[in-house]
Amino acid sequence: MTKANVLLLINIVLFQCAWFSLVLGYTTLGMCITLGLFIHTALTSTQASKELLFCLLVVMFGVLADSILLQFDVYAFTASFDVNLGKDIIPLWLVALWLAFSLTLNRSLKWLVNMPWLLVIMMAVFGPLSYFAGSQLNPNQIRINQELLAVCVIQWAVIGFIIWGLYTCLLKEHDTASLSGEKHV
């Protein structure tokens, strides 16, 4: 197994561990795993500052989008499971989950980010599916108004476009230059 494959596998495994930990209510463990994923990304990135800025922007858009849906009662979160940042914003465990997800976009999901239409379709399908799965695994942690699930599909499609745009602006140039042998200073 090559070093690149090992790094990819670490990214996948850490994300999945973070997802399950956070969704099942093991917030401290999930945040520690997310921190490990963050450190792993920072230490192995060839362009750490750009990649981490990209992740921060993805998290900001994700938190904003989910907080808006929270206001429209698409989602409901149980306060007893986590530190809440306020009634108008999603709980801290979901912010950590957004961070963990963002850290996969230039790693294990890089192949998807390079195909914008497939990215949007996959995000529109698997984003809401992930939230639905989380609500089924731990209905005490998150509840989804299933009558409004279509709104989640639209939300995730829009986030897919945003992610592709951010990736194109911040990271794609480096990928193209790397393939052609150019070096960035």
Image (cartoon, rainbow, N blue to C red):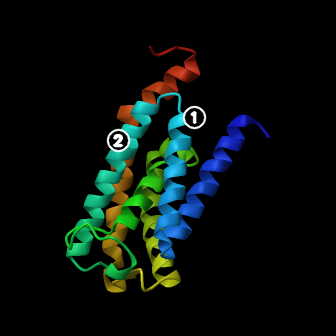
Q: Amino acid at mark 2?
A: Gly
Q: Position of residue 173 (x, y in %)?
A: 43, 26
Q: Is residue 56 above or below residue 79?
A: above
Disc 1 crowd rating (10 Å Cα; few below 14, some 14-19, many 20+) is: few
The one of 40 and 152 positioned closer to us in this rendering: 40
Tell me, for residue 127, which label it has, or none: none
x and y, in percent, of residue 64 in the image: 25, 59
Quarter placement of the N terminus? top right
Q: Are marks 1 and 2 in contact (CB under 8 Å)?
A: no
Is residue 147 left or right of 107 when viewed as pictured? Answer: left
Q: Which mark is residue 44?
A: 1
| Distance between mark 1 and mark 2 Cα atoms | 23 Å
- Whether residue 78 is visible to the viewer of this picture, yes or no, is no
Residue occupying image coordinates x 44% and y 65% = 127
The amino acid at mark 1 is Thr
* Residue 125 in view in this figure: yes
Please report whichever mark, 1 or 2, sits nearer to the chain's N-terminal start. 1
Pick the residue in front: 82 or 174: 82
- In the rendered image, the quadrant that contains the C terminus is top left
Q: Residue at x 40, y 31 (%)?
A: 49
Badge 2 marks a residue whose secondary structure is helix
The crowd level at tag 2 (other Cα within 10 Å; few <14, some 14-19, many 20+) is some
x and y percentages locating residue 125 in the rendered image:
46, 67
State the residue at coordinates (32%, 45%).
57
Disc 2: which residue: 165
The local secondary structure at tag 1 comes to: helix
Q: x and y percent of residue 8 in the render?
A: 64, 45
Q: Is residue 48 left or right of residue 107?
A: left
For the point 29% across and 71% down, the residue is 84
